[in-house]
Image (cartoon, rainbow, N blue to C red):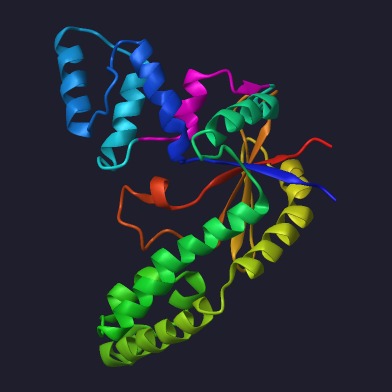
Amino acid sequence: MKKYVLIKEYNSAYDYWLRAHLREKRIFGDREYSWKEAQGIIMDMDARGVHDDFFQKYFWSWANHPEHPPDYFSLLCMTLPIYKDDKPDLLVTAQLDGEASKRNQKILFTIEDVAQDFYNFYDRFLIKPLARALERGAEGNKLSNYFEYEELARVPDPRIHGQEKVEYSRQEIATDLLQRFRTITPEKILVDIEQTLNQHYDKGLAAASLERSYNYKSEYVQISANKARGPDKQVTTFLTPARSCRAIREGYEGVYYPTYYVEVAPL
């Protein structure tokens, strides 16, 4: 049976290397910087006709959520030789993981780690806020932020049944949904991750093409595989929660919605 290692797309552990890279470029100094300060720096660079491609991407990624640094794996890959043969080099990432561990951080994650992370996402962004919304008597349009296609399909057509019936139905669907959410545990998510990866990992790699990606959604998680542009490019596989990030404030999906790159661990 395969064993997997996973790399998180947004991870505060990357900040150490990203800031070091900016210090090497003499864009940042040895202290912490805010987004507003970074905005001032890039405006000054523009005024002087100075352009740095990495800092441009770093700044605009940060602009989506100014209070959270843009600690993305995609940015880290621009600063360190992480990729080999068009996929993350596990030897290099293991070395980074060893460095991060000295700061009580991680780069490489197990499926057990991911199961707990997904549970924390469900608890923080779906279970608790939906419970509060129902307790406070939120209207159906707000409750619909927690619905997926299967729930939305159950909402009656207001042109036929009227708005009162629609509102009652949304409240009923949201109550049922909260009961389902409250049965979620890290252990159930872990079993789902194991089954999903074992059954669909190779299938996703084979099915992904330049024209379309492979997607499979189970009860708690979703696996997707995308082939990069170019005939010799590898397929990249992602694992995310099955429920969407519609309840997250716009611009903060990248920070709070847990997204992992999947790699098979060497024997």
Please report the bounds of the magenta region as a residue range.
70-84
Image quarter (top left, top right, bottom left or bottom right) of the C terminus: top right
**Residue at image location 56% in from the left, 79% down from the top:** 183
Q: Position of residue 11 (x, y in %)?
A: 47, 40
Q: Position of residue 131 (x, y in %)?
A: 37, 79
Indicate whether 104 appears above or below 87: below
Does the magenta portion include 17? Answer: no
Q: Nearer the viewer, residue 214 or 67?
A: 67
Q: From the viewer's perspective, is 148 left or right of 140?
A: right
**Corner quadrant of residue 265:** top right
Q: From the viewer's perspective, is 267 left or right of 255?
A: right
Q: Nearer the viewer, residue 51 or 203?
A: 51
**Residue at image location 49% in from the left, 51% down from the top:** 258
Indicate whether 234 appears above or below 255: above
**Residue at image location 28% in from the left, 15% down from the top:** 27
**Residue at image location 63% in from the left, 43% down from the top:** 6
Q: Position of residue 25 (x, y in %)?
A: 35, 10
Q: Nearer the viewer, residue 101 or 25?
A: 101
- Can residue 243 be seen? no
Indicate whether 246 appears above or below 229: below
Does the magenta portion include 72? Answer: yes
Q: Position of residue 182 (x, y in %)?
A: 50, 79
